[in-house]
Every structure is written in C-alpha cells, then in structure tokens.
Image (cartoon, grey):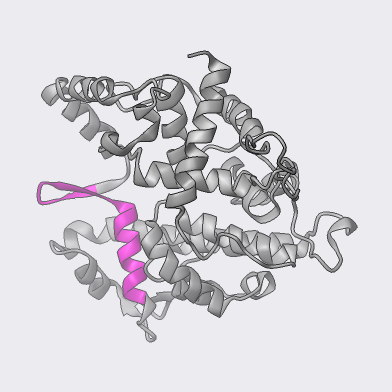
C-alpha cells in the first residue's frame, strides 16, 4: 500500500472506529465560550494525565476545579492548598508546576490581543512553550483541545499507533526505530488529512463549517482524542487487542500479531542478561534497597507528602522515618532521610518548624 493511500485508509478507519467507541471525559467537548477558561481546564487535565490513569484523573479533576475554578484562583493558591487538592494523584511536584504555570499566565498575558470577552490564554506555540512546565506535547494539546487549532503532537498512545501502523513494532529492547522528529512529521501529514471533510456521496450538500475543522466538522480535538482512545482501548502497550483491531483486519497497520509477538519474544530471549541490564538502568535512579526490592527516592518523597497532608501539627523526624520505612533504622537511615527532606524543602513542598515537618504554607 502506498504511503498516501495508507494515510487516507488509516484516517477513515480511526474516524469510523471513534464514532462508536468515543470515551466521554469531563475535559472534552467543552461548551465554554471563554477561551481562558477552556485553556485552563485543558491545561489542568493534561498535567493530571501525565503518568496517572484516566479513571483516577476523572475524580480528582472535578475536585480540583471545585477548589480552583479559575486560572486566577489557582495562580494565587498557596503551596499547601495546591498539594492538599492534589491528594491521590502522585508526583506532587506536578501540582506546584501547574500552579506556577497559572501564575505565569496571569502575570504575563501575551499581548493585548488576548484581553477581551473571550479571554487572554496564550494560543501560539512559542507563547505556550515560554511558560515553565509546558512542553511541546502539552502546548499542542492545549491548541487542539482548547482552541481547535490543528497542531501535530505525540504522546505515548499516538507514538505507539503511528509507529506500529507505518513503521512496524517496537524494537526488542522496547525502543522505537523512528525518533519523535520523524513521527511528528508523519503526525502532521496525517492530521492534514484527518481534518478534511469526510467523503460524501455526489449531490449531497456540503457540511457546516467550523473553526479548525477543515470545513467539514472534523476537529483536531476529536482526532487526537480518537488516537488516544484507540491506543488506550485497542493498540495497548503490552497486550494489543489484535482480534478487534480494524487497522490489522484491513491490512492498514504494517504490524500484526506475528511481528509484534516475534519482537516481544526476542526481548524475552535476552534472558538474564537483559533483565540485569534493565535492573541496572533502573537502579541509577536515587533510592535504596528495602529487603531485596529497590525503591526509588521519589516513592519515599510521595509517602512523606501523604503523611503530612493531614498532619496539622507536623511530624517529627524519627516518627516520619518510621511511618515511611518498614525497615527504619535511625543510625543507618538518618542521613538518607535528611537528603530527601532537604529536596522536598528546596522544591517548596514541605517546611520544618521547631523540629517538625509540615506541608509548605
């Protein structure tokens, strides 16, 4: 199948699948006129969705917006209030980065063109990328989902679908043959086709046009949602559902069950050497052994924040060590815990008062 034909077949197949499998999520299809509010809600959802399951985000997203309903509310919130509202999400530094991004947008609106009845949230890529904590994917997602501005972007699901469809399965080591630069170029080609009006029988009137829809009601927001849903529900990372995948059934995806399983079995045949390599790579992350299991320090940092969320009077150093470590030994672990607490203090997540640790105020 030629490249152009594969793109068209891929696009129509994904659109067709999405028409009956679309997930209803609270940050999609926002019927909100104010662009600042739309941008804010998408920013919150995208930061929350980083390394957190959708089912958990759905619950905490509503709770978070109930407490911080506007960009200004979040921008003026204290570290403590933000961390408390982030309960259950993990990776607590994301909460403070999100608050700092809101503060940056409020303090430095990008030019007078954004003041007015529709808000002042930045739209252009260079403007979004100038905000600390917003990377290329998040900036593209904001443009697609909040403003319906067609912008190619790559997340884990989109990367997996595009690579398996057009280039083949992952390498035996789990990495991809093509880098994100090549995939982003491909994503742009695919997006250009995806937002065009769908094929229609001759003699039928043209569909209504809309912003960012290519004149046919197909929006970049829906397209990227379709790819994410397909990656989450069909072309998953470890166990793709080949029996219900329309891309493989129609011969559009160059990867199939056999080629995927062959790559997977090659990975398994690396044996103990491959496992040792993976263990060595993971152990480069700061942490320590608890029994025979390596626990990264970020896990302990998360435990500390959880312990302090409800501790209004704070927790003493030794008590904190006992709460987060089943093998706590004051002599052996004192210096290690001090280092972890100092990092949390540098990140302005906790503070020490009279020998007790509390969430930063």
Query: Looking at the picture, how far across and down is residue 302, in whole percent?
Result: 34, 62
Question: Residue at (18%, 57%) from the top-left corner?
Answer: 332
State yes or no: residue 299 in magenta: yes
**In the depicted view, which residue is nearer to us: 197 or 155?**
197
Question: Residue at (66%, 32%) from the top-left corner?
Answer: 192
Q: Look at the picture and state if 126 lies above or below 271.
A: below
Q: Is residue 100 left or right of residue 250?
A: right
**In the depicted view, which residue is nearer to us: 194 or 42?**
194
Q: Which residues are magenta?
A: 288-308
Query: Looking at the picture, how far across and down is residue 90, in whole percent?
Result: 38, 61
Q: Is residue 172 left or right of residue 358?
A: left
**In the depicted view, which residue is nearer to us: 167 or 193?**
193
Query: Looking at the picture, how far across and down is residue 95, in whole percent?
Result: 51, 63
**From this viewpoint, which residue is outermost toward the bottom?**
313
| Residue 327 seen | yes
Q: Look at the picture and state if 351 lies above or below 182.
A: below
């Amino acid at each position: 199948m030629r490249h152009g034909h594969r793109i068209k077949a891929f696009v129509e197949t994904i659109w067709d699948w999405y028409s009956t499998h679309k997930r209803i999520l609270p940050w999609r299809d926002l019927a909100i006129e104010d662009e600042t509010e739309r941008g804010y809600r998408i920013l919150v959802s995208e930061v929350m969705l980083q390394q957190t399951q959708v089912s958990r985000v759905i619950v905490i997203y509503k709770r978070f917006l109930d407490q911080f309903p506007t960009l200004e509310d979040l921008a003026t919130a204290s570290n403590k209030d933000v961390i408390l509202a982030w309960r259950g999400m993990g990776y607590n530094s994301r909460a403070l980065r999100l608050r700092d991004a809101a503060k940056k947008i409020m303090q430095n609106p990008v030019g007078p063109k954004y003041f007015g009845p529709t808000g002042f949230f930045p739209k252009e890529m260079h403007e979004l990328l100038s905000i600390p904590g917003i990377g290329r994917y998040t900036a593209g997602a904001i443009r697609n989902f909040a403003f319906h501005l067609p912008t190619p972007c790559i997340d884990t699901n989109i990367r997996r679908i595009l690579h398996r469809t057009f280039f083949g399965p992952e390498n035996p080591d789990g990495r991809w043959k093509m880098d994100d630069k090549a995939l982003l170029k491909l994503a742009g080609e695919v997006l250009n086709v995806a937002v065009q009006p769908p094929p229609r029988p001759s003699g039928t009137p043209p569909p209504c046009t809309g912003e960012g829809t290519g004149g046919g009601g197909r929006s970049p927001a829906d397209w990227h949602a379709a790819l994410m849903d397909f990656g989450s529900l069909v072309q998953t990372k470890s166990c793709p559902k080949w029996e219900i995948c329309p891309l493989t059934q129609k011969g559009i995806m160059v990867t199939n069950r056999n080629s995927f399983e062959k790559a997977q079995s090659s990975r398994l045949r690396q044996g103990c050497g491959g496992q040792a390599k993976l263990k060595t790579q993971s152990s480069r992350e700061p942490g320590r052994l608890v029994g025979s299991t390596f626990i990264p320090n970020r896990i302990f940092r998360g435990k500390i924040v959880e312990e302090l969320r409800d501790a209004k009077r704070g927790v003493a150093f030794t008590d904190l060590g006992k709460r987060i470590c089943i093998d706590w030994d004051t002599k052996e672990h004192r210096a290690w815990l001090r280092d972890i607490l100092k990092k949390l203090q540098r990140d302005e997540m906790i503070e020490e008062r009279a020998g007790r640790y509390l969430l930063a105020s």
